[in-house]
């Protein structure tokens, strides 16, 4: 569950850091099971413990959106469990990139580079340290000069190979950061309006009559994958749709009911949910890598997008944005994702069948993507789903 930020960490982190360094094992506690309510593994805690055992804050990876997604998920588990070692680990990772004066060694020339900025906002809220505000403002100020399409959509990246392009993925990279930055630093008049604008512009170009979105749009219509008439990419990739759904419910949670354009977001979500229900695999409860071609040769159900959709539908139904009946769709998806996680002989979790990072392509490209185990795209979305489901 995405809970409000709370300032709780005003004291030094010595004890918590020691806990991070000393921790071992992949313990479990009682939690609601997928179907019976019986005592079961707390999969959120097990995933966090396993990941912290596999990687230190120094070895988990550089500044990137997959690591940022995972650590945001870990923060949600921290908010429930109050295990300070989870937050200390997050802080230790961020502090690799943020100097004492708030300088951050990133260029922010792509939306992908901005997702982990949410952690800067979190750490400012939790610690009150000014350096995190300075670092977060670097991203916020970059958006003032960031390139846009003619109707105001942020390009996926400020590079020649991504110029004029909108990818569904980019919405989750920047929209939640904007909304949370606005709340923390008193900038919501701009950030709420910008978030709604981005979601609206992207949906206007990418959302299809079936409610789902093509992966990308090229305003210049010159990309190798772009339809020369429409500028659209050829396929509806599942994780791109997952990013869109999560960005949409985040915005609906955060922008006020009176925000202009909010009603259109509700309408988009309603159509989106119907599309998800239509294409959910009835046998597994998951969704296919190329989401609207479930019976096509070589297609396969993918774990990260299925987690994202379970999160989106569960939260949207609980908050009343869509019909309460979608809770059953989300529950089926949750069960389907749980079928792909297990404890190994070493006592640590393994989450399987996760598509690795993916560019825009055709059907053959998507279905040929590597099916990874414990990829951070999957671990992060799993934690969001797991915490929402409680």
Image: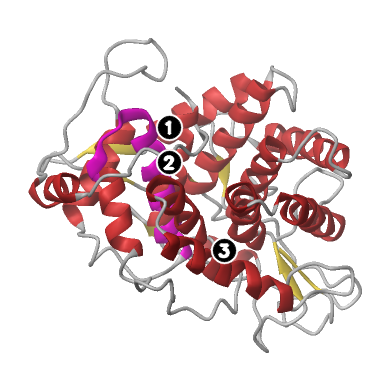
The picture quadrant where one finds residue 276 is top right
Q: Is residue 366 magenta?
A: no
How far across and how far down the image is residue 22, in percent? Answer: 8, 48
How far across and how far down the image is residue 55, in percent? Answer: 21, 58
From the viewer's side, name the closer residue of 300 and 219.
219
Q: Which residue is mark 2?
A: 382
The answer to whether the residues at label 2 and label 1 have Cβ atoms under 8 Å apart is yes
What SS does tag 1 mark? helix
Residue located 72% across and 22% down the image: 320
Residue 186 - label: none
Residue located 20% across and 28% down the image: 28
The magenta segment: 65-85
98 over 81 or under it: above or below: below
The answer to whether the residues at label 2 and label 3 have Cβ atoms under 8 Å apart is no
From the viewer's side, name the closer residue of 332 and 204.
204
Q: Which residue is mark 1?
A: 386
Could you tell which of marks 2 and 3 lies nearer the N-terminus? 3
Residue located 64% across and 75% down the image: 142
How far across and how far down the image is residue 138, in percent? Answer: 56, 72
What SS does tag 3 mark? helix
Could you tell which of marks 3 and 1 lies nearer the N-terminus? 3
- Numbered disc in front, either 3 or 1: 1
Q: Which residue is mark 3?
A: 366
What SS does tag 2 mark? helix
* Drawn side of residue 288 relative to residue 164, left or right: left
* Drawn side of residue 229 relative to residue 243, left or right: right
Check disc 1: other Cα within 10 Å, few if <14, some if 14-19, many if 20+. many
């Amino acid at each position: 569950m995405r809970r409000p930020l709370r300032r709780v960490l005003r004291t030094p982190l010595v004890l918590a850091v020691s806990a991070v360094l000393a921790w071992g094992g992949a313990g479990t506690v009682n939690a609601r099971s997928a179907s019976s309510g019986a005592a079961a593994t707390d999969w959120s805690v097990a995933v966090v413990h396993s990941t912290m055992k596999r990687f230190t804050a120094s070895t988990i990876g550089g500044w990137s959106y997959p690591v940022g997604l995972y650590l945001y998920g870990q923060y949600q588990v921290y908010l429930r469990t109050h295990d300070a070692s989870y937050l200390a680990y997050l802080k230790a990772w961020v502090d690799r990139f943020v100097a004492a004066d708030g300088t951050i060694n990133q260029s922010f020339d792509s939306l992908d580079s901005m997702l982990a900025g949410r952690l800067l906002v979190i750490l400012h809220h939790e610690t009150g340290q000014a350096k995190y505000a300075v670092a977060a403002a670097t991203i916020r100020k970059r958006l003032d000069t960031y390139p846009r399409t003619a109707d105001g959509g942020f390009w996926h990246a400020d590079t020649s190979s991504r110029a004029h392009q909108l990818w569904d993925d980019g919405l989750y990279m920047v929209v939640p950061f904007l909304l949370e930055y606005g709340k923390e630093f008193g900038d919501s008049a701009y950030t709420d309006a910008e978030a709604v604008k981005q979601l609206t512009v992207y949906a206007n170009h990418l959302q299809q009559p079936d409610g789902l979105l093509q992966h990308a749009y090229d305003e210049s219509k010159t990309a190798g994958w772009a339809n020369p008439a429409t500028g659209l990419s050829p396929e509806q990739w599942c994780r791109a749709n997952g990013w869109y759904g999560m960005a949409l419910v985040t915005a609906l949670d955060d922008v006020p009911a009176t925000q202009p354009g909010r009603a259109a977001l509700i309408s988009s979500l309603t159509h989106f949910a119907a599309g998800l229900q239509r294409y959910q695999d009835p046998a597994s409860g998951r969704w296919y890598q190329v989401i609207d071609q479930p019976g096509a040769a070589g297609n396969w159900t993918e774990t990260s997008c299925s987690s994202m959709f379970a999160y989106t539908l569960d939260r949207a139904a609980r908050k009343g944005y869509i019909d309460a009946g979608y809770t059953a769709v989300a529950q089926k998806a949750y069960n389907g994702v749980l079928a792909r996680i297990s404890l190994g002989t070493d006592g640590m979790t393994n989450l399987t069948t996760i598509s690795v990072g993916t560019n825009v392509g055709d059907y053959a490209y998507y279905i040929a993507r590597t099916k990874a185990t414990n990829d951070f795209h999957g671990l992060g979305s799993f934690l969001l789903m797991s915490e929402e489901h409680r």
